[in-house]
Amino acid sequence: MKRAFDLSIGTMGLLLFSPILLFFILLVWLQDRKSPFYIAPRIGLDGTPFKMIKLRSMTAGADRTGVESTAADDSRITRVGHMIRHYKLDELSQLINVVKGEMSLVGPRPNVQSDVDLYTDEEEKLLTVKPGITDLASIVFADEGEILRGSSDPDLDYKRLIKPWKSRLALLYIEKSSIPLDLRILYLTALTTFSRRRALRGVERTLMVLDADDDLIGVARRDRELCPA
């Protein structure tokens, strides 16, 4: 049932957003005459590698710097890339992965092999479902770049302040997964574009319904300084 949901909504989404995607594909290509796509190696269901398709928001070859986390003030982000990241257009191209069956609309965000190698026994459960374009953590940490702005070591700060909470939110999603929950998360993801405050309130109410612990609900409010989980 989830696959049928992903395929139908994913196909409609590609058709609906194709004019926007095509426009930004052209803008990315015009800025440096390089491929408008970044093919990102990721780990999916059951630990299977796949190639995640992203609309390129950084300079060509930016991944060769070895820095995986991206702060909002990262010099590798192009002018067009700032728009792409602001409106999450780099995630829209992943609808292709959804249609191909490598990803779901909703699910834990896929990680690189080096991060997967460091999974705890509990985090191994993240590989029991297909990775998704969005999830609860994508809404709570939609401002990830701003959190890392000014950081002298974005990778370290990401692993300390963001990744543990993302994993906990993803594990809760896996435990409570349902089509109604997927619809709720898709709605809140769209709402984030127009009103982040309302979206966060929506996540807070959703976590309460899912019987999440107080620490997780507190982090979802995003009204206090982040600390390691």
Image (spheres, rainbow, N blue to C red):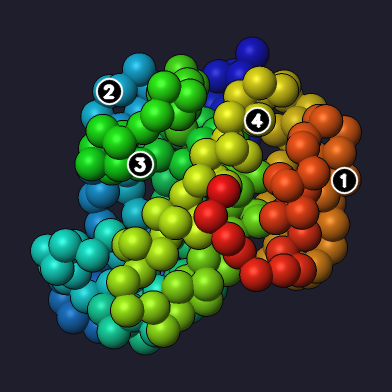
Which residue is tagged 3?
Answer: 111
Q: Give the image location of residue 204, x and y in percent.
A: 82, 49
Q: Give the image location of residue 103, x and y in percent.
A: 44, 32
Q: Which residue is at 45% across, 80% downward?
A: 149
| Three-letter amino acid code of the residue under disc 4 | Tyr
Against 2, is 116 above or below? Answer: below
Which residue is tagged 2?
Answer: 48
Which residue is tagged 1?
Answer: 205
| Three-letter amino acid code of the residue under disc 3 | Asn
| Three-letter amino acid code of the residue under disc 1 | Arg
- Does any portion of residue 10 appear in the rendered image? no
Under circle 2, the secondary element is: loop
Q: CA distance from mark 3 to mark 1?
A: 27 Å
The mark that comes first in sequence, 2 or 3, is 2
Q: Residues within 10 Å of mark 2 (few under 14, many from 20)?
A: few
Against 40, is 123 above or below? Answer: above
| Three-letter amino acid code of the residue under disc 2 | Thr
Q: Which residue is at 40% across, 29% downward?
A: 120
Snapshot quadrant of residue 186: top right
Against 104, is 189 above or below? Answer: below
Q: Which residue is at 30% across, 36% downward?
A: 118
The mark that comes first in sequence, 3 or 4, is 3
Snapshot quadrant of residue 180: top right
Q: Give the image location of residue 164, x and y in percent.
A: 50, 46
Q: CA distance from mark 3 to mark 4?
A: 17 Å
Q: Is residue 74 left or right of residue 135?
A: left
Which residue is tagged 4?
Answer: 173
Q: CA distance from mark 1 to mark 2?
A: 34 Å
**Front one among 46 and 40:** 46
